């Protein structure tokens, strides 16, 4: 598995993104530093969110892990384990939060099984109450993978202005990442793609900057950033792309309007600082 990721990331560059979608070269503007190691209990970190406590963050494990969130500081020291009630970790792939103290945990991974129903757990930190947001993809009966597995697999989401935005992992032959949106409220939704963009790397995490002007996509090997205009989340304004190779990148969060925190499933913590 590590060899597969090594080969995949070595050949992952921003050149196609510069050419096809007019992303700018921005690597020179960022400093990448390894700053810590996640606690061993978070053995497959797959999502990140800020804790309600200053200076602390939350992560969760990938498929088959416990239905729990692990609170840690930037050095990787474990502060607390939060069990998420009324939830099951079938395949947790990303998480996000809102200003009211709610966390949204995306149980929508679909790498190895033909799932038909997906959910996002809305967990209120103050009350320890969990609600379920269920969804399906309108066209999820379509198949274009050689092995016949479904193309409807996502590993990334973020919260923005009372909505949740999900990005497909782009298993398809044409390498198009699709964008979906739904209300951040309990219910059962059928999703239709609202936009798409060609990216030749699989998207594993996403986040939006605190000022609501930028969102970023993390992939195996690079980070792509988009501008937000007129409060619309779409792919109309590509900003920049830079390589970021650190084994199996799975989680990303903005620390402020420019800097980011990234973790991988090998437990490394990276800070990406705008110079």
Image (cartoon, helix red, strand yellow):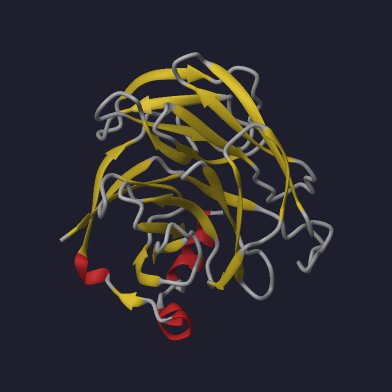
Residue sitting at 61 percent across and 34 percent down? Answer: 185
Q: Nearer the viewer, residue 250 or 128?
A: 128
Residue 179 at x, y percent in the picture: 59, 60
Query: For residue 118, which quarter of the picture?
Result: top right
| Residue with the most extreme top position | 127
Residue sitting at 78 percent across and 69 percent down? Answer: 144
Residue 59 at x, y percent in the picture: 44, 33
Above or below, 94 against 3 in this view is above
Residue sitting at 42 percent across and 50 percent down? Answer: 207
Above or below, 137 against 104 in this view is below
| Residue with the most extreme left position | 275
Residue 203 at x, y percent in the picture: 53, 59
Residue sitting at 26 percent across and 35 percent down? Answer: 74
Query: For residue 142, which quarter of the picture?
Result: bottom right
Q: Nearer the viewer, residue 18 or 134?
A: 134
Identify the image quadrant of the C terminus: bottom left
Residue 55 at x, y percent in the picture: 25, 30
Q: Nearer the viewer, residue 182 or 262?
A: 182
| Residue 216 shows up from this direction | yes
Above or below, 98 against 168 in this view is above
Above or below, 246 against 40 in this view is below
Q: How many labels, in total?
A: 0
| Residue with the most extreme bottom position | 19
| Residue 249 shows up from this direction | no
| Residue with the most extreme front position | 230
Identify the image quadrant of the N terminus: bottom right
Residue 261 placement, left or right of 6: left
Residue 219 placement, left or right of 108: left
């Amino acid at each position: 598995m590590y060899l597969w990721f090594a080969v995949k990331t070595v050949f992952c560059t921003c050149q196609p993104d510069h050419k096809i979608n007019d992303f700018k070269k921005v690597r020179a503007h960022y400093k990448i530093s390894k700053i810590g190691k996640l606690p061993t209990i978070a053995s497959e970190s797959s999502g990140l969110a800020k804790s309600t406590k200053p200076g602390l963050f939350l992560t969760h494990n990938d498929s088959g892990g416990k239905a729990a969130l692990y609170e840690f500081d930037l050095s990787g020291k474990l502060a607390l384990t939060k069990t998420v009630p009324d939830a099951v970790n079938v395949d947790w792939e990303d998480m996000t939060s809102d200003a009211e103290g709610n966390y949204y945990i995306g149980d929508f991974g679909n790498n190895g099984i033909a799932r038909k129903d997906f959910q996002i757990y809305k967990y209120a930190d103050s009350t320890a109450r969990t609600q379920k947001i269920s969804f399906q993809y309108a066209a999820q009966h379509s198949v274009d993978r050689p092995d016949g597995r479904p193309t409807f697999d996502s590993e990334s989401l973020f919260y923005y202005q009372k909505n949740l935005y999900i990005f497909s992992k782009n298993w398809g032959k044409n390498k198009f990442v699709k964008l979906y949106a739904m209300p951040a409220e309990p219910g059962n939704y059928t999703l239709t793609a609202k936009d798409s963009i060609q990216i030749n790397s699989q998207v594993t995490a996403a986040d939006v900057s605190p000022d609501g002007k930028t969102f970023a996509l993390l992939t195996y090997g690079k980070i792509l950033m988009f501008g937000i205009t007129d409060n619309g989340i779409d792919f109309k304004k590509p900003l920049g792309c830079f390589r970021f190779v650190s084994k199996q990148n799975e989680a990303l969060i903005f620390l402020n309007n420019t800097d980011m925190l990234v973790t991988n499933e090998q437990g490394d913590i990276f800070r990406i600082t705008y110079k």
